[in-house]
Image (tube, helix red, strand yellow):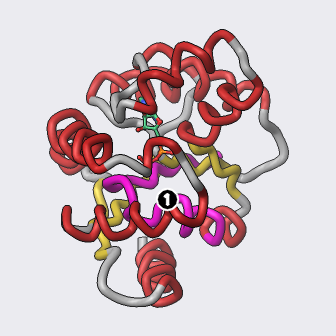
Amino acid sequence: MKYYVLFGPPGAGKGTHAVAIADKYHLKHISTGELLRAEIAAGTQLGKQAKALIDAGSLVPDSVVEGMIASAFDTIKGYDGFLLDGFPRTIAQAQALDRILQERGETLEAVISIMIPDEVIYERIARRAQQEGRADDTSKEVIAHRIETYHTQTEPLIGFYRNAGKYHEVAGHPGTIEENRNRVLAMLEAL
Ligand code: ADP
């Protein structure tokens, strides 16, 4: 099995490009954000706890998303691997991912990082707010907090994965969605 991480700030286009990558390489796309939103929609206990944190632009506890990932690896069959989107988001989650993979006798193939500047994050999220109506996309303060959370908690993963020799970065801006997608796919082909 091949395990890939799709990395980048909110609005970088991870979800948008994940579908094409997963299709091409026959990977199961797992977005922790989508899994959490499904829990909220289903009104589960976990969803209720996660909602306040997500709406405020904060991260949910590491243990919650780590459990989701481990259970996805255990239960989802019939693919050549997994494409993780939005996980890991903290160093602790990255270490947990290493442990989870090690227990399965697997290793992480590569981290594909899609990079955009902060001002583009605002533009993209504002546009998405109109299309998808996500509560955490509508307030400027919440978006600012997510960007800050990205810089303080998630960005340190760049060094973590660089040291591991697994970090590959591609520009997620400028260009059309298709141009950006082709850049990401070309980079994966070259690995
Ligand atoms: P975006 O990439 O636009 O921020 P996501 O759908 O990936 O959107 O995530 C939405 C929210 O879900 C995050 O702001 C956070 O609250 C929560 N979340 C998603 N993935 C994780 C994670 N790995 N760890 C903690 N919280 C997460």
Looking at this rendering, what residue extends furthest in the right direction?
78
For the C terminus, the image quarter is bottom left
**What range of the chain is rendered magenta?**
1-20
Dot 1 falls on a residue whose secondary structure is helix
Where residue 174 sits: x, y (%)? 30, 85
- The amino acid marked with disc number 1 is Ala
Where residue 183 sits: x, y (%)? 42, 83
Q: Is residue 153 rendered to the left or right of residue 187?
A: left
Q: Residue at x 50, y 64 (%)?
A: 128
As drawn, 49 above or below 91: above
Can the viewer see residue 169 in this picture? yes
Residue under label 1: 129
Can the viewer see residue 164 in this picture? no
Quadrant of res 99: top left
Quadrant of res 56: top left
Report the front residue among 112 and 163. 112
Q: Residue at x 16, y 45 (%)?
A: 159
User: Ligand 1 appears in which quadrant?
Assistant: top left
Where residue 151 sits: x, y (%)? 17, 44
Is residue 8 part of the magenta span, yes or no?
yes
Looking at this rendering, what residue extends furthest in the top direction?
45
Q: Residue at x 34, y 29 (%)?
A: 58
As drawn, 44 above or below 30: above
Quadrant of res 122: bottom left
Report the front residue among 183 and 133. 133
Where residue 147 sits: x, y (%)? 24, 47
Is residue 159 part of the magenta span, yes or no?
no
